[in-house]
Image (cartoon, coloured by chain):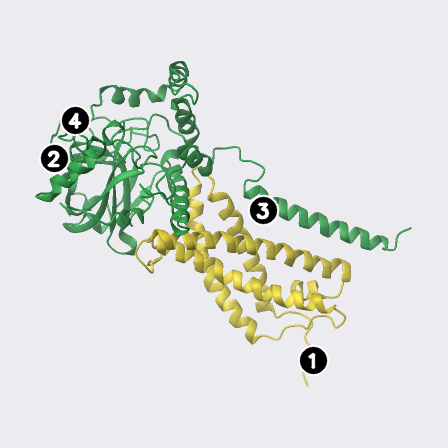
Amino acid sequence: MSMIPRHKVTSIAIIGFAVIALICAFLYAAGVFGKKQVTAQQFVDFQQGENPHLGFRRAHAKGVCVRGDFIATGELAAHTRSTLFEIGSTPFIGRFSIGGGNPSAPDLESGVRSLALSFDAGSDQQWRTAMNTPPVMAVGTPEDFYAQLQTLMPDPETGQRNPERIAEFFANHPETENFRRWSAQYQPSGSFSSEQYHSINAFYLINQQGEQQAVRWAAVPTVQIDENQYADTDQAANALALDVRDQLEDGTIVFDLVFTLASSDDDENDPTQPWPESRQQITAGQLVIRQLEQDAAICNNLNFDPLILPRGMQATNDPILRARSASYAESYRRRARETWLGKEQQQ
Amino acid sequence: MTQPVTTFPLSMRIFHWGMAALVLSMIFAGLAMVQSLQTWQPTVLALHKAFGVVALVAVLLRLINRLRSRVPALPADLPGWQVFAAKASHVLLYAALFAMPISGYLMQSAAGRAVDVFGVFMLPPLMSADLVWYGVFREMHSWVAYALIALLVVHIAAALQHGLLRQDGVLKSMWKR
């Protein structure tokens, strides 16, 4: 019947099966058959929405780039091998931003403000941190965070949030209580310089003896500014950026960088729980912002990935912290490709 | 006059199977980690970068070893197009094995990031952070990976064809003495 001998048919079948199995294994790893858990791509797809702002960060798209120096007190040096915290000064690039993916959103209407910093004191002393105004996360896992964002999303038809869905989500997630309590009492100030910015997630400091200490940190403002002079002008959309520009024209903006040390009662892997006020606090130094960086590319070039840590600091197992890196990388990849291919939008 | 060799020398077989395990692990890790938000992701990413440096050193030593070794000839009765395909695919495999870690290091550099090699030493970035170059090298790293996957599928299919269908000793020459 056949021209091909039986043993060859078997061989061809084995080869075909092996090759198809191999291809399927690659496709499976690449997620072609779907992923059980939420992916970085789904997350960034959600953040950018239907009409992404090409070339811009998918989160915190609008911001202002600054430069300054970190003047370390040396008080944290006993807790970490990192040389950044020895007495002395390290330059940094910083970026104040507002939440959201719209690069032309009105400054004063965003519910979240951020300060991101990048230190580069040699290959093993690179440190980037992206800090936000809330001190805690509402939820503790990327899956729950994704569900939270979807719940808070306005209905595409009515343009309104669904209060019943939101109430149901919060009822099902009692860990959101601390975040909600903070949110209810938070009053945005008149300036980026008078907000307190939190690491939110915890990290480990590693000292010379190799011992680890869980910490969180915050940039604590040194001024109180309640009103923004641009708030009721036709420049209100850029009120926070203009205020930073004005302050840096003839002065500096200063924050204390304060570390809070966890006790053994605190769960460093749970970003939804604040640590008690009584925990030891150490002022590692002052963040002295000296000038506006006119070249926006200096900040656009950077991904403020919170897992870029100097020797002497390590990531905890906080699921949110560990998810931030991959989603930041996906956003960075998209805007880099768009910028390379000249597809970026003009703001 | 020396006898023609019928098998690859032990050193080449060690490089071949060792790098096969390394490269397949790196590809599967890479495909999964660019999507995952799970807690293992940063750990696997750090290992991927460190082993990438191992892979670059390994392929360099492997190429030097290859050029210094006597390798078995292809079967005399192999059709001309298959001889060409065999030679071309091996050149492309070597090119991809170099391009993978190099593009990986370049993309880290363009992000302004050093590469931590198992906590032992740091490879410094070659440039200050640059979004456009990051875009170029990041996409390059992906496209070379897809090309390498395609080459590996062809390579494995061809090896099985030699071993099961033709039974001409080509698969055996990399398999045993």
Q: Chain of mark 4?
A: A
Question: Does residue A14 appear left or right of residue A40 in this picture?
Answer: right
Query: How far separated are the C-alphas under marks 1 and 4?
Result: 92 Å
Is A35 displayed left or right of A255 in the figure?
right
User: Which circle, 1 or 2, is nearer the viewer?
Assistant: 2
Is there one chain holding both mark 2 and mark 4?
Answer: yes
Give how far across and how far down residue B25 sits, in percent.
53, 51
Label 2 sits on a secondary structure element that is: loop
Q: Position of residue A78 (x, y in %)?
A: 19, 45
Q: CA distance from mark 3 to mark 4?
A: 57 Å
Which residue matches tag 4?
Answer: A232
- Amino acid beneath label 1: Gln
Same-subunit check for callouts 1 and 2 = no
In the rendered image, the vertical position of residue A291 relative to residue A4, given as above or below:
above
Q: In which chain is the residue bearing label 1? A: B
Residue that numbered label 3 is attached to: A26
State if disc 4 and disc 2 touch (CB < 8 Å): no
Chain letter, disc 2 residue: A
Please report whichever mark, 3 or 2, sits nearer to the chain's N-terminal start.
Answer: 3
Chain A: colour as depicted: green
Give the residue drawn at x 69%, y 49%: A18
- Asked whether the viewer can see residue B129, the reply is yes
Q: CA distance from mark 3 to mark 2?
A: 54 Å
Ranked by sequence position, the earlier of labels 3 and 4 is 3
Instruction: Find the residue positioned furthest to the right.
Output: A1
Q: The C terminus of chain A appears in which quarter of the rendering?
A: top left
Residue hosting label 1: B3
